[in-house]
């Protein structure tokens, strides 16, 4: 089945001094989802934003809020971010806790549950989680900071996960995050991804170019 390619701009690369306006601009420019990276300074060596900021950003867009928790533990954040307006909450396989229970609890909130893996984590680690998730996020850089170079070796993993999803007959989106640009977007889609997270490739441009870059990523892919 041919899937629509979705573009989820990562606001980690946006201008935080005018974050609401940036979200409004990418919404208007044709973003399908809004990707929000939550980092706790523990699971990854960076600290970003909390639930109150996410809640305030809902005033600027009605698009899908794609919340990626790079935290450990994760369970303490499920209620706050679901109440703040997350439409998808993705957690890491590598984080502490019972991942199946966490994914079930996310779904109980009436939102979609995602599982993410770092570059060094094998796709075999998530085989048993497919029935509990709506999205799989493959990190194509080491999580924690934007602007990193795409890790080519992850393409094989994306392909293997696409096969796992197709064989399962489950309706699961396959998302990639890290180093996504005109060249790598096509490689990822060819490997089986259908959701592309892009940060610097969009936000490094002038706001007037956001629509052009989003369309370019989608059309190239």
Image (cartoon, helix red, strand yellow):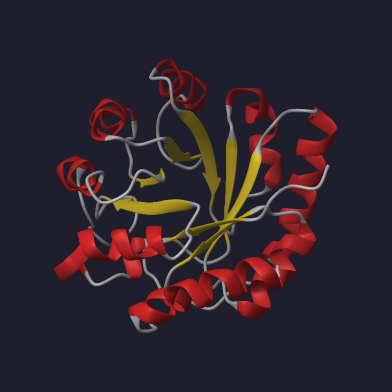
Front-most of 18 and 27? 27
Q: Residue at x 44, y 36 (%)?
A: 88
Left or right of 169? Residue 193 is left
Q: Position of residue 156 (x, y in %)?
A: 77, 60
Front-most of 183 and 129? 183
Q: Position of residue 187 (x, y in %)?
A: 73, 70
Q: Residue at x 76, y 54 (%)?
A: 192
Q: Is residue 198 above or below residue 147?
A: above
Q: Where, by quadrant of the figure, is residue 7 drawn?
A: bottom right
Left or right of 96? Residue 4 is right
Q: Is residue 10 above or below residue 205?
A: above
Q: Residue at x 66, y 23 (%)?
A: 131
Left or right of 72? Residue 183 is right
Front-most of 30 and 165? 30
Q: Position of residue 179 (x, y in %)?
A: 53, 73
Tally of numbered tags: 0
Q: Residue at x 14, y 70 (%)?
A: 17
Left or right of 103? Residue 159 is right
Asked whether the viewer can see residue 165, the reply is yes
Asked whether the viewer can see residue 45, the reply is no
């Amino acid at each position: 089945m041919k899937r629509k390619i979705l573009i989820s701009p990562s606001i980690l690369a946006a201008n935080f001094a005018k974050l609401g306006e940036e979200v409004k601009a990418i919404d208007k420019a044709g973003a399908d989802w809004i990707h929000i990276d939550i980092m706790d300074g523990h699971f990854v060596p960076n600290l970003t934003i909390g639930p109150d900021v996410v809640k305030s950003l809902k005033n600027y867009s009605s698009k899908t809020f794609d919340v990626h928790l790079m935290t450990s533990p994760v369970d303490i954040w499920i209620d706050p971010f679901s109440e703040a307006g997350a439409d998808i909450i993705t957690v890491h396989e590598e984080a502490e806790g019972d991942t199946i229970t966490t994914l079930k609890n996310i779904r109980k909130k009436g939102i979609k549950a995602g599982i993410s893996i770092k570059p060094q984590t094998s796709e075999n680690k998530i085989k048993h989680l497919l029935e509990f998730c709506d999205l799989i996020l493959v990190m194509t850089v080491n999580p924690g900071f934007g602007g990193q170079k795409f890790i080519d070796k992850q393409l094989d993993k994306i392909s293997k996960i696409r096969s796992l999803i197709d064989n399962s007959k489950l309706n699961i989106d396959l998302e990639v995050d890290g180093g996504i640009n005109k060249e790598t977007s096509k490689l990822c889609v060819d490997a089986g991804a259908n959701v592309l997270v892009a940060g610097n490739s969009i936000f490094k441009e002038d706001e007037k170019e956001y629509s052009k870059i989003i369309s370019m990523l989608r059309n190239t892919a």
